[in-house]
Image (cartoon, rainbow, N blue to C red):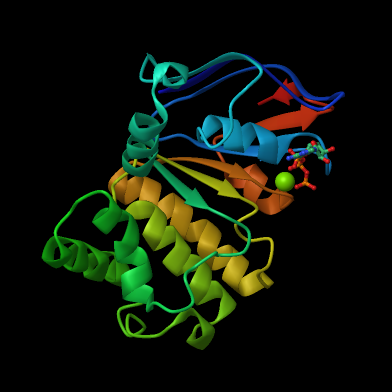
Amino acid sequence: MIELKGITKSFGSLLVLKGIDLTIDKGEIVSIVGPSGAGKTTLLQIMGTLDKPESGEVLFDGVNVEKMKEKELSKFRNRNIGFVFQFHQLLPEFTALENIMMPALINGVSFKKAKERAEEILQILGLEERGAHKPAELSGGEKQRVAVGRALINKPSVILADEPSGSLDTKNKEELHQLFFDLRDKLGHSFVIVTHDETLAKLTDRTIHIIDGKISDCN
Ligand SMILES: Nc1ncnc2c1ncn2[C@@H]1O[C@H](COP(=O)(O)OP(=O)(O)OP(=O)(O)O)[C@@H](O)[C@H]1O
Ligand SMILES: [Mg+2]
């Protein structure tokens, strides 16, 4: 479904990614692990079309995203890829429900439909009582689940998460991890999760080890 071929990336004279080949299949949950500075976030940003590789190709179902113009690419990204970051990055002025609705509204879905879908998602997330709360009125775990809801609303084929449980305590961490597996089972999303959490990495279908800008080991 997602295919990376020979991806390299430098920042100035620093060669961060040194030729990455990687395929993510439909419905797979893949973890990416490796030491700080190894290039994990850089790789995820390239996979998510938020950054461009220096050389190499990113293909979604065989389509080369490199060939898309900026406007077409942002539309493609909004429809096909969901993002969850370490610090939720919810909009503080908007409620949980509105935050979840946002990508759908940007995608041109009507307000009524977006609201219905966001309400369904709040239920799936077990947050139906929290829809009217703003981020400041939610716990860390709840905020992260709302961020997952926002990533889900356009029914993307893949969700890319960069240390999504990095700022959570053990209980919230475990709940969030369980949510990823439940969503995959219920809705069939693929997940690519950058994590420092060994317990999570062990639960995933496959772990990619990035060391010094290269894939060192797969299982
Ligand atoms: N925009 C940038 N400009 C310059 N250097 C950058 C930029 N982004 C990342 N780097 C450098 O590239 C290297 C890889 O960074 P990256 O963020 O991908 O690492 P990481 O594996 O995600 O690390 P961490 O586990 O700490 O999040 C680092 O040395 C970093 O300083
Ligand atoms: Mg990182």
Residue 18 location, quadrant: top right
Residue at image location 33% in from the left, 30% down from the top: 72
Residue 132 location, quadrant: bottom left
Q: Position of residue 117 (x, y in %)?
A: 21, 62
| Left or right, residue 57 beside residue 76 | right
Q: Position of residue 88 (x, y in %)?
A: 55, 65
> Which residue is nearer to you in this view: 40 or 209?
40
Does 69 appear above or below 124?
Answer: above
Q: Let me know if residue 22 appears in the view.
A: yes
Does 156 appear above or below 87?
Answer: above
Does 117 appear above or below 46?
Answer: below
Locate the N terminus and report the quarter of the image it occupies. top left
Does 58 appear above or below 130?
Answer: above
| Left or right, residue 94 beside residue 3 | left
Q: Position of residue 148 (x, y in %)?
A: 44, 59
Locate the C terminus and report the quarter of the image it occupies. top right
Residue at image location 58% in from the left, 55% down from the top: 85
Q: Let me know if residue 126 appears in the view.
A: no
| Left or right, residue 195 beside residue 84 | right
Residue at image location 54% in from the left, 64% down from the top: 89
| Left or right, residue 155 beside residue 198 | left
Q: Position of residue 34 (x, y in %)?
A: 78, 38
Residue at image location 68% in from the left, 41% down from the top: 41
